[in-house]
Image (cartoon, helix red, strand yellow):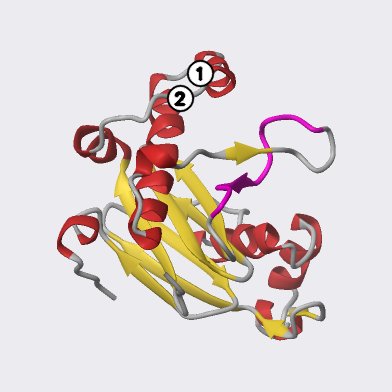
Amino acid sequence: MTLGDAFTAVARSHDVLKLIDGPPLDEADAERRGRLARAQDREDFTAVRRAALLLMGHLRGVPASALEIHQLCDHCGGRHGRPRIPNTGNLDVSWSHHQGTVAVAIGPGRIGVDVLAAHPRPPLPSAAVMTQVEALFKTGAGTLDDLLRQARRPGAPELTSQVHFSDTNQRVTLQTVGLHNDVTVSVASTCRTRFVTLDYLRRNECYF
C-alpha cells in the first residue's frame, strides 16, 4: 500500500487497552515498563505501542501481530530511541503519551508527534508551542533548545519557515489540534496529516 498522507491516531490509554488485545511486550520492553513507578505511566507505555502496531497494520494491510517495534538510541544504543517498525516501506513512525492520552503518527517521509493532556503553567509556553517544538524535534529539525528559543523570540517567523530537509528536498508543515479535556496534539510532517479515531481502524472513518 502506497500512502501519500500521514495518519495520526489519538486516544485514551484505557480505551486502547480495552479495544486491543496484545501483542505482548517483548522481554526488553516488559522490563522497561516494570521500572516505571506510576501505574498510569505503565498503562501509557503499553497502550502507545499497541496503537502503533494497530495503525501500521491497518495501513499496510497486515495483522498487527505480524509486526514488531524496534527502538535504538542513536547516542547510547539503548532501547529508548525513536520507534521503528521494520519491513514497512518508507513509512516513518512517531509516538507520544501524556497522562493517559496516547498519540501515534505514521506516514511517508519525516514525521513527529507530541501530545499534552494539560496546559503548561507560566513561565512555560502554551501547550500548542510546547507540542509543536517537540514534534519538530522528532523530525530532526533541530535541538529542543534551539527550537524553543526560536518559538519564544518576539516577532520570530513561524517555526517551520526555516525547516527544510536538503537530502529529500522537503519542507515540514505543522498541524495542531485541541481536543476534549485540554488535550493538545501537534504533528510535524512532510505531507498532509489526517487525524483518525480508534474506530477508524474498524469503520474506515476519519475526522478533522
Which span of residues is magenta-colored? 77-87
Q: Amino acid at mark 2?
A: Leu
- Where residue 30 appears, as percent x and y from the top left, is 50, 18
Name the foreground residue: 42 vs 169. 169
Q: Secondary structure at mark 1?
A: helix
Q: Which residue is mark 2?
A: 25
Q: Residue at x 41, y 45 (%)?
A: 53
How much space separates mark 1 and mark 2, taking CA atoms? Answer: 6 Å
When asked about the image quadrant of residue 133, the answer is: bottom right
Say which residue label 1 marks.
30
Q: Is residue 192 magenta?
A: no
User: Circle 2 — which element?
Assistant: loop
**In this image, 178 relative to 129: left or right?**
left
* Quadrant of the rendered image containing residue 153: bottom right
Q: Nearer the viewer, residue 79 or 132?
A: 79
Percent x, y of residue 149:
77, 65
For the C terminus, give its image quadrant. Answer: bottom left
Residue 37, percent from left and from top = 50, 15
**Left or right relative to 68: residue 182:** left
**Residue, x 35% and y 52% (percent of image)?**
62
Q: Residues within 10 Å of mark 2 (few under 14, many from 20)?
A: some
The reply to whether callout 1 and callout 2 are in contact (CB within 8 Å) is: yes
> Which amino acid, by three-letter code, is at mark 1?
Ala
